[in-house]
Image (tube, grey):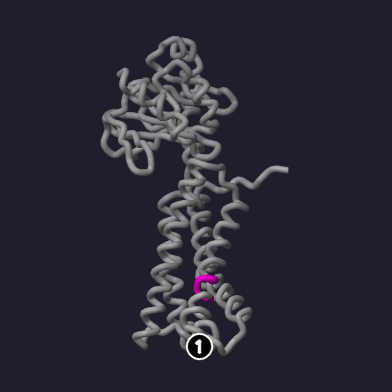
Amino acid sequence: MTTKKLPHYLIEKNNLIVQVTISVLFAIAFLAVYIPLSNTTTAWFSLEEQNKFIYTAFFVILSTIFLIFSRVMMYYTSKRLIRFTLPIFIIWCLVEIVLIGLFHAYISLRIMHVQEYTHALIIGKSVLITFIALGFPFIVTDLSFALLDAQRVLKIARSVIQSNENNNQNTQKNISSEQIVTDNPDIINFNDYTGALKFTVKLENIYYIKAEGNYVNVLYNNKGGISSFVLRNKIQAIEDSLAGTPLMRCHRTYIVNSNNIKLIRNEADGYYIDFNQTGLESVPVSNTYREKIVKRFTEI
């Protein structure tokens, strides 16, 4: 039995920031509408009475801080400690909701001394309301991320089709020159998953190669500008074919041309590579490959 792999977009840093922001704003808006209609667990919530407003703001601020801290821990745990799976992600989100609901119930029972209702009712409804206030935006934002990722994959697929159509015009030329190209260490061949030659480029022009699901995207210098070529293959197969070249794996998603590295930055969340070309994204370096990349860079 295989474990359901976590979609990468659920744990991307920018998506986590967007999700927390939208969830907090939705929860505040939801409470503003719900408070006047409630006569049980949110009896002490108020945006008007000064004393109750202070406790309401206290609850919202601490819950937001907890949610931010939880997502920071989620991000670094998934990147550095364990391989996150979809069930773990779902359980983590449910635990967040339950803990915030229990925090609300604690304030109701121990600080505001709500006594009109049983403890079980207050705790149960606190968790339920928290699930509605946070669970709904969690689900909606995750579905939005899934849709955006599907659109990205579709765009890549269309790019592959277009690239293949362009390559078909020069297939005979590429095949006839394949042996010459292979023997030239300054030229890099890129084959698709069937082993067919799809793209050749000078080594000095390559910046990095990025995994895009079942495809790889080659970023290279084209007459002073940045161009990309997408082909269907696994990044592991590409890495194996590049053994002995300056093209080195630096991350599970990236292979970089060490000859074109401008600098390596040590940031709070890890190492990053910048290239000697403006307009390129900074590429992360994982702990697995950090020592090898730094050693190669210092030898250049």
Determine whether 220 is above or below 19 in the image: above
| Amino acid at dot 1 | Leu
Q: Residue at x 55, y 60 (%)?
A: 93
- Residue 235 versus residue 153: which sits nearer the camera? 235
- The quadrant of the image that shows the C terminus is top left
Graded by Cα atoms within 10 Å as few (under 14), some (14 to 19) or many (20 or more), the crowding at tag 1 reads: few
Q: Say whether residue 140 is magenta.
A: no
Determine whether 230 is above or below 245 in the image: below
Q: Which residues are magenta?
A: 101-105
> Dominant secondary structure of the magenta stretch?
helix
Q: Residue at x 44, y 83 (%)?
A: 45
Q: Residue at x 53, y 80 (%)?
A: 109
- Quadrant of the rendered structure where residue 56 is? bottom left
Tally of marks: 1
| Label 1: element kind | helix
- Quadrant of the rendered structure where residue 65 is? bottom left
Q: Position of residue 151 (x, y in %)?
A: 49, 51
Determine whether 296 is above or below 88 in the image: above
Can residue 151 be seen here? The reply is no
Q: Position of residue 106 (x, y in %)?
A: 52, 75
- Residue 247 versus residue 174: which sits nearer the camera? 247
Determine whether 19 is above or below 167 in the image: below
Q: Which residue in the protein does label 1 denote?
A: 37
- Quadrant of the rendered structure where residue 220 is? top left
Q: Position of residue 261 (x, y in %)?
A: 31, 28
Q: Position of residue 280 (x, y in %)?
A: 32, 38
